[in-house]
Amino acid sequence: MSVSWVPRIAAIKSINFDNTQSLSSANYIGLVDAWLHDGRLETLKEKEYTTGDNRWLCAKFKLINAKVHNTEVRRFFLHRILAEQIDENGARTTEKHRETKCRNGKIGANAEQLKPLKDALVQENGPPKDRVAYTYKQVNGVALQTHVFPAKDPSKLSPAFIWFHGGSLNTGHWNYCSVLCRSLQAEGFVVIQVEYRTSQRFDGTPLDALSDVYSVGDWTIKNANKLHINPKQIMTGGFSSGASLASQWQY
């Protein structure tokens, strides 16, 4: 959509971004969400948003902070944006947004609202108890990780199952479908759950995600002995878009 399209400009001008009474209106919230979704396209063209993690989050935060002046409305939308990001993509690398904005009182209305965000951050970044996290690739300074759940018998080489989460290549978290993956582990597989580039976190394309699929496949074969994997027994799978990606890998 062109930024100079007259109906677009008129629609944006019609929004009262500082009206606290509108926060109870689903139509108003939907309109602001649409504005954010549209506006982040231009913001992502700016140099500081062309690299790094959580790019859509960064772009939307900039838009809200620049356009909304009422403290209550700003808090509402900053909290909403961050909560959605964590719910759909996980909490990884969101620390600077959550911590800074919480300390300054700019995000979230109260401690009760902030608690689930803080808990998610602790869970995401805490030491793993049942798996080992490895970096299989660095992209623009961001470490992409595999989360390896070892087979029950480490004394022998086991088959591996590489799992790719779903999310339409737009969102998603490596730990989607954990029940299925733990069932595969119980059946004797080394299960590798993969973090790959999505559009919301990395402004990634399907080709970026596919590149990550091949990178993690190569990484798995290279580290087969270390991971106690039989390199001739590697399966791939996934859910939704993850299944599409898994089907493309060959070795």
Image (cartoon, rainbow, N blue to C red):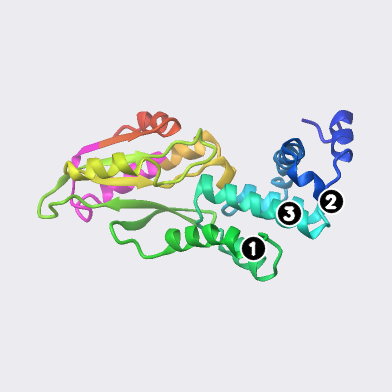
What is the spatial separation of the Cα atoms under label 3 and label 1, in whole angstroms?
22 Å
| Residue holding disc 1 | 110
Quadrant holding the C terminus: top left
As helix, strand or loop, the secondary structure at mark 1 comes to loop
Q: Name the residue type under label 2.
A: Asp
Instruction: Give residue 9's position: percent from left, percent from top.
Output: 87, 35
Quadrant holding the N terminus: top right
Q: Residue at x 18, y 52 (%)?
A: 228
Q: Is residue 142 above or below residue 172?
A: below
| Residue holding disc 3 | 62
Q: Are marks 3 and 1 in contact (CB under 8 Å)?
A: no
| Mark toward the viewer: 3 or 1 | 1
For marks 3 and 1, the one nearer the N-term is 3
Q: Say whether residue 51 is left or right of residue 124.
A: right
In the rendered structure, does residue 199 fall within the stretch colored magenta? Answer: no
Q: Which mark is residue 10?
A: none
As helix, strand or loop, the secondary structure at mark 3 comes to helix
Looking at the image, which is closer to me, 223 or 39? Answer: 39
In the rendered structure, does residue 229 fall within the stretch colored magenta? Answer: yes
Q: Is residue 192 above or below residue 251?
A: below
| Residue holding disc 2 | 18
| Mark toward the viewer: 3 or 2 | 2
Q: Is residue 93 visible?
A: no
What is the spatial separation of the Cα atoms under label 3 and label 2, in whole angstroms?
16 Å
Q: Say whether residue 234 is left or right of residue 154.
A: right
As helix, strand or loop, the secondary structure at mark 2 comes to loop
What is the spatial separation of the Cα atoms under label 1 and label 2, in whole angstroms?
20 Å
- Crowdedness of circle 2 by 10 Å Cα count: few (<14), some, many (20+)? some
Range covered by the magenta-colored residues: 213-234
Q: Are marks 3 and 2 in contact (CB under 8 Å)?
A: no
